[in-house]
Image: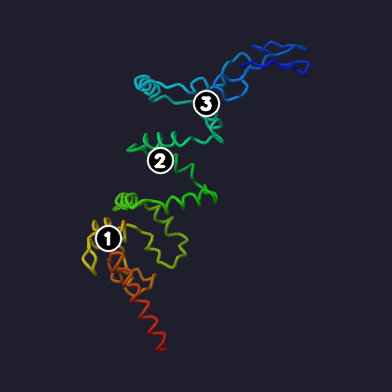
């Protein structure tokens, strides 16, 4: 599709860099159908010539092998990054990306780069709201998988210090240390004898730690009791009842 427009400027960039004076110039629209204007002499905007084309698996494999280990220059990366600004992938594309990333292990260098780019990044209120909705609608199976995946996971010293720093929820600093809690957590509930596996299957979470005296700041190993979700709720109710009865006596 072509459209002829009149050039008002005295001098303008013409076809292949030839300068035209007071002449008419052809403006071509990109043949992919996006509606954008191409550069003089071009049928497509850069990167649009592959839109809508479906490659065979063999072709995809050859392209993947050809690009393996190839590093793009910084200028090309910058252009690709700018081209993606404001572009939202379709649900089909998101599903394909999700399937492609299943079981994919990132290198340490890749993890380090991701970590460095997220330093100081803060989610918008809209993103926070979306994450909250996703967490609420999360299936029990997903919760179970996440619980199993995090079981026994050891955090680095720097990560533990970040979690401990600035704690304002009433708990002691050691409460942020997952390794400490894993060491003192027993394998069975002291109330009913439920195991960790049974707790994950029934409640979707591992056995929890209960403060015997009800004081969050007291994180001494002797002050903890390993309980399932049901026994933990009963123990908390019992503590509240004792406190209320003590207050009445006073």
Q: Quick one: label 2, few (<14), some, or many (20+) residues within 10 Å?
A: few
Tell me residue 241's x, y (percent).
36, 79
Q: CA distance from mark 1 to mark 3?
A: 50 Å
Tell me residue 233's x, y (percent).
33, 69
Is 43 located above or below residue 231 in the figure?
above
Instruction: Please identify the quarter of the rendering in which residue 91 is found.
Output: top left
Residue situated in front as seen by the camera: 49 or 164: 49
Q: CA distance from mark 1 to mark 2?
A: 28 Å
Q: Secondary structure at mark 1?
A: helix
Instruction: Please identify the quarter of the rendering in which residue 188 is found.
Output: bottom left
- Look at mark 1 in the image and give the residue it sits on: 183
Is 61 located above or below residue 142 in the figure?
above
**What number is the disc on residue 111?**
2
Image quarter hosting the N terminus: top right
Contact check, label 2 and label 3, Cβ < 8 Å: no
Q: CA distance from mark 2 to mark 3?
A: 22 Å
**What number is the disc on residue 76?**
3
């Amino acid at each position: 599709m072509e459209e002829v427009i009149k050039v008002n400027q005295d001098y303008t960039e013409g076809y292949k860099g030839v300068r035209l004076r007071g002449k008419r110039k052809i403006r071509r629209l990109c043949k992919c159908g996006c509606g954008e204007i191409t550069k003089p002499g071009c049928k497509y905007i850069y990167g649009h010539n592959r839109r809508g084309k479906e490659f065979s698996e063999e072709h995809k494999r050859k392209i993947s092998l050809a690009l393996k280990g190839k590093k793009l220059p910084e200028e090309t990366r910058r252009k690709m990054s700018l081209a993606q600004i404001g572009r939202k992938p379709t649900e089909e594309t998101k599903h394909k990306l999700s399937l492609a990333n299943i079981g994919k292990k990132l290198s340490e260098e890749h993890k380090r780069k991701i970590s460095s780019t997220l330093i100081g990044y803060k989610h918008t209120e809209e993103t926070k709201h979306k994450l909250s909705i996703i967490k609420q609608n999360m299936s029990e199976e997903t919760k179970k998988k996440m619980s199993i995946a995090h079981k026994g996971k050891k955090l680095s010293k720097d990560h533990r210090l970040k979690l401990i720093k600035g704690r304002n929820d009433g708990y002691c600093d050691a409460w942020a240390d997952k390794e400490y809690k894993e060491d003192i957590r027993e394998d069975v509930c002291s109330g009913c004898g439920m195991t960790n596996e049974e707790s994950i299957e029934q409640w979707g979470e591992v056995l929890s730690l209960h403060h015997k005296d009800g004081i969050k700041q007291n994180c001494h190993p002797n002050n903890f009791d390993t309980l399932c979700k049901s026994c933990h709720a009963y123990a908390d109710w019992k503590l509240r009842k004792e406190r209320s009865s003590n207050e009445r006596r006073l």
